[in-house]
Amino acid sequence: MMKIGVVVHGPQIVDTGFAEKILRLLENYGIVKARLGGTMGRTAVIDAKLEKIIDINMKLLPSQSIDKISQDSDVVFLINYGKSIVTGHAFGYKVFSRCHSDPDLIQIERPGEPDGTVIPWKPHLTDIAENMASDLDLKVITPSDVVDSMEPNGLYNSTEDENIVYRKIAGVSTDENIFLNGIVVGRSTSSDVTLVAKNGILTHILGGKIKEHGVEKLGRIELDSAVVKTGLLRRSKIKPRIIERNIDQMYNKDNSKLNISYLSHAAEDIYKLKDSDLVVTVGDDTTLVAADILYRFKVPIIGITDGDLDRVVEEGFRTVGSMIVELESGYDDIIGKKIFLELFNGCQTMEIENIENFKSKIIQIISSTTSRYNLKHN
């Protein structure tokens, strides 16, 4: 039997039901093993109850997931549902070019759309690609077709001029968030967007407006290899799946201490905090994303925000018992740092005995710094 590896990328391929459909179809061709590529699809896999079928335990880039699963596979499928065929093809090209294993890779892109395609990234994979295309009513295109469509727009490669790197973004629409490595660094003002970095720091967004605070959080990067996304992190409106927590997970053995975690960066692995009893989040987007993910595990949050929200998901959820503090612009980082140093003593986790007392201490820190804040309880 042929060993088939599948790398699932992004929430849309899961939310539409095509991830499960493709996995079932591939079982007709051999033994199938699937894992997630990237991190944004993890919540979708959980909501779809597919975590026993799609391995979501490792936080790997798509190319890293392909390299890993190809070690024990005769062929690897990369399944994705890009925002447009342009973004989907550009994504596939970038991923394939970054793989170190020279994998036998077939990409299935936007299977629910009229422009959906199957791309055998090596010629000898054409037969199985055509079979899958027939099963899904898609057309097969060659890698050269992908490159030809990208080349006139300069999408398939970045250019370097001494210490300045340019990177054009595929398939952007006007007024969309622009993410670099999971952090919002700007917003598009046109459909023709190019990122510019000097000495590893993002300095300009041609065709967009840069977000300085996001650039500060991002720090130094390799622009050519950074993960770029535009628009919403998750486009579908899906009812979240609530996972019941074991009472033993909610308390320490003495049944008196509560585990509290601190999160200041939305690009960090929020799923590591799913067994916390409460999470303090700093920043509007960090609070929105963390609250939405942790809602599934019944973990409340205390969000320190300043109204600088980029709306990175279509609809966010919060666990009952959560509290949002809205401050003046720029004060979220100031207050967050004080909480981290004064309450957490510079550590990412701490133990407390009473959540309400802990909330009171946070409010004391805030009120001693500024009188202008609003509280929202959930």
Image: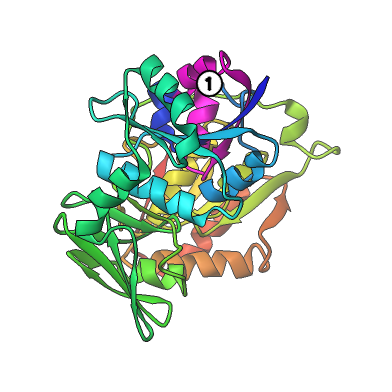
Residue 88: image quadrant is top left
Badge 1 density bin: few <14, some 14–19, many ≥20, Cα 10 Å: many
Measuring from the top left, give residue 223's x and y in whole percent.
Answer: 41, 68
Give the residues in magenta.
Answer: 19-48
Residue nearer the viewer, 322 or 175: 175
Residue flagged by tag 1: what amino acid is it? Leu
Residue at horizontal 52%, vertical 44%? Answer: 39
The answer to whether residue 278 is visible is no
Q: How is the image coloured?
A: rainbow
Residue at horizontal 21%, vertical 61%? Answer: 193
Q: Looking at the figure, which quarter contains the N terminus?
A: top right
Residue at horizontal 73%, vertical 51%? Answer: 351
Residue 83: image quadrant is top left
- Position of 208 with respect to 129 (left or right) is left
Measuring from the top left, give residue 324's x and y in whole percent.
Answer: 42, 48
Residue nearer the viewer, 240 or 234: 234
The answer to whether residue 269 is visible is yes
- Residue corresponding to mark 1: 23
Q: Residue furthest front?
A: 124
Question: Is residue 221 one of those drawn in magenta?
Answer: no
Q: Looking at the figure, which quarter contains the C terminus?
A: top left
Measuring from the top left, give residue 40's x and y in whole percent.
Answer: 47, 42
- Position of 166 with respect to 27 (left or right) is left
Question: Is residue 47 one of those drawn in magenta?
Answer: yes
